[in-house]
Image (cartoon, grey):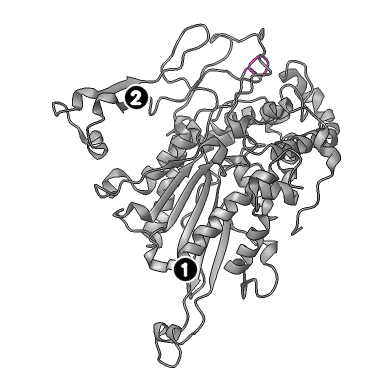
């Protein structure tokens, strides 16, 4: 459907607010330890295998051998098969939204036998040693600090340190990960994503310069969570490693305060959105728990005897979080969770729990409206200023919830949970007008000829998205429905942009 439907008011009062805070583990990075409990048994290292990872050895083939029935999808950015625009279209600007790389589960689940998935993940040996500047370096120009050598003034104030996770019993093992932390594999895959961006937009298309000389031509932003920050740093290094940046052109990355964040559906700052999401989560439990009941005989033995439910303990989404993280790292999971017929039933339920709200106009406006307005405004600025606006690529490190919400908001969601390093791109193209009668386009424009037409192409997981909002004749490039006209895109974004976000976010909504 093109337009979201009106939300029934009775959905809004089903459940107390605390329910949603348990529900929001992925987006808000709150560890879900509800299964473990205060008195839960935590297996020792002799009872469950401590998980180790070698990120460079045969992950894909090993995963397929261990899990022939189901492999959590991981779709690297495809450079070779990227479809260039039709003749006459020139790429002007690219907005990229990428989910962070592989991480550990955000909570401890299924660690007891017979599942025996360890709560100690020894997969974070990379980037554990840090070089930090301390307060006595405040007088040293920032650009000089990374280049200080031993013996130079200020070098004695570089703090070398190592980050190590301490367990609750006081022991510590170097290389262990925190809950929800980007692993060595996640660092590698996000670096590879950055490298593929470089291969595509620099090596193949020549859209970006080989060496960065103007840091205003790139834009990097992330949510304020360690796994997305670390992912973005890897991506940045993949696109423009240090030796490909001129001395004064090293790019910065941007982070917003929580109340201003728009890279996710911000329930922290929008109470109305929180209430709506609670209602949809409760409705999903009522609608889909019956479909999960037949799985209890197969799965409850791995859940401490508890049934698997949308609102269970642990929640079905939390169980799948552990399963996905394990499969992504080649960690053995109970065979039932490699049965596609089982996984599909669970995924269908939790996708509806998290994203059914984005089929409604109000959730779209409150959850994604401000982000889409950002995209449209930056593209419009590029259209108006042309080459005088140097900004060419914008890369945002975010979460699975943002990618699914964006796709659903444009009626292009495939109802599958986004993979690690899954990405969406919005590409702005300009149609190059043909010269007329030997006169240059510049001369004709001075005579009042129309300005060049602009188009936007949305891509997700290496696929062009054909958006219903651009289906009508005149709303897309003739013969190429994946290329929306900028005007059609902007018109829909305007409908989705809150005129007074603070007012619409009041618990009762805008009256």
- Residue 83 visible within the image: no
Q: Residue at x 78, y 19 (%)?
A: 306
Q: Residue at x 49, y 84 (%)?
A: 449
Q: What label does residue 213 carry, if any?
A: none
Pointer 2 residue: 129
Residue 107 image offset from top left, x and y in percent: 61, 23
Span highlighted in magenta in the image? 111-116
Residue 331 image offset from top left, x and y in percent: 56, 26
Q: Is residue 113 magenta?
A: yes
Q: Is residue 41 left or right of residue 180?
A: right
Asked whether 271 or 6 is in front, the reply is 271
Q: Determine the main secondary structure of the stretch shown in magenta.
A: loop
What is the spatial separation of the Cα atoms under label 2 and label 1, in whole angstroms? 46 Å
Find numbered disc 1 in the image and state the secondary structure of the residue it sits on: helix
Q: Earlier in the sequence, mark 2 or mark 1?
A: 2
Residues under numbered marks 2 and 1 in contact, where contact means CB atoms less than 8 Å apart: no
In front: label 2 or label 1: 1
Pointer 1 residue: 384
């Amino acid at each position: 459907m093109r337009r979201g439907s009106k939300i029934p008011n009775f959905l809004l009062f089903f459940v107390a607010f605390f329910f949603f805070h348990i529900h929001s583990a992925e987006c808000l990075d709150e560890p879900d330890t509800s299964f473990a409990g205060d008195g839960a048994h935590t297996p020792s290292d002799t009872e469950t295998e401590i998980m180790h990872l070698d990120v460079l050895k045969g992950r894909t083939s090993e995963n397929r051998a261990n899990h022939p029935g189901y492999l959590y999808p991981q779709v690297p950015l495809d450079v070779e098969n990227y479809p260039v625009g039709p003749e006459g279209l020139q790429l002007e600007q690219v907005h990229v939204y990428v989910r962070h790389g592989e991480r550990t589960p955000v909570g401890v689940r299924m660690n007891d036998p017979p599942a025996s998935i360890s709560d100690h993940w020894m997969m974070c040996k990379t980037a554990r040693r840090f070089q930090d500047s301390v307060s006595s370096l405040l007088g040293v120009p920032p650009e000089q600090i990374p280049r200080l050598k031993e013996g130079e003034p200020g070098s004695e104030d570089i703090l070398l340190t190592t980050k190590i996770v301490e367990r609750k019993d006081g022991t510590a093992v170097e290389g262990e990960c925190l809950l929800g932390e980007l692993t060595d594999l996640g660092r590698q895959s996000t670096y590879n994503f950055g490298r593929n961006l470089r291969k595509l937009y620099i090596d193949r298309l020549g859209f970006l310069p080989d060496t960065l000389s103007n840091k205003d031509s790139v834009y990097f932003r992330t949510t304020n969570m360690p796994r997305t920050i670390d992912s973005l740093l890897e991506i940045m290094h993949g696109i423009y490693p240090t030796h490909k940046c001129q001395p004064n052109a090293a790019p910065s990355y941007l982070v917003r305060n929580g109340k201003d964040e728009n890279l996710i559906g911000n329930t922290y700052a929008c109470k109305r959105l929180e209430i709506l999401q609670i209602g949809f989560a409760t409705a999903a439990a009522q609608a889909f728990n019956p479909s999960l009941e037949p799985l209890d005989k197969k799965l409850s033995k791995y859940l401490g005897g508890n049934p698997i439910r949308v609102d269970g303990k642990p929640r079905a989404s939390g169980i799948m979080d552990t399963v996905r993280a394990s499969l992504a790292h080649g960690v053995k999971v109970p065979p039932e969770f490699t049965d596609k017929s089982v996984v599909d039933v669970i995924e269908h339920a939790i996708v509806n729990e998290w994203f059914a709200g984005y089929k409604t106009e109000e959730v779209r406006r409150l959850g994604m409206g401000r982000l889409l307005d950002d995209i449209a405004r930056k593209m419009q600025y590029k259209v108006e200023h042309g080459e005088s606006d140097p900004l060419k690529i914008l890369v945002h490190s975010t979460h699975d919830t943002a990618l699914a919400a964006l796709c659903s908001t444009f009626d292009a969601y495939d109802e599958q949970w986004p993979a690690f390093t899954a990405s969406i791109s919005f590409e702005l193209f300009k149609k190059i007008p043909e010269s007329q009668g030997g006169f240059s386009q510049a001369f004709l424009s001075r005579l009042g000829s129309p300005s060049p037409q602009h188009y936007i192409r949305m891509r997700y997981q290496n696929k062009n998205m054909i958006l219903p909002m651009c289906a009508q004749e005149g709303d897309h490039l003739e013969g190429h429905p994946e290329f929306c006209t900028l005007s059609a895109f902007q018109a829909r974004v305007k409908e989705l942009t809150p005129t007074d976000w603070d007012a619409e976010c009041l618990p009762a909504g805008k009256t």
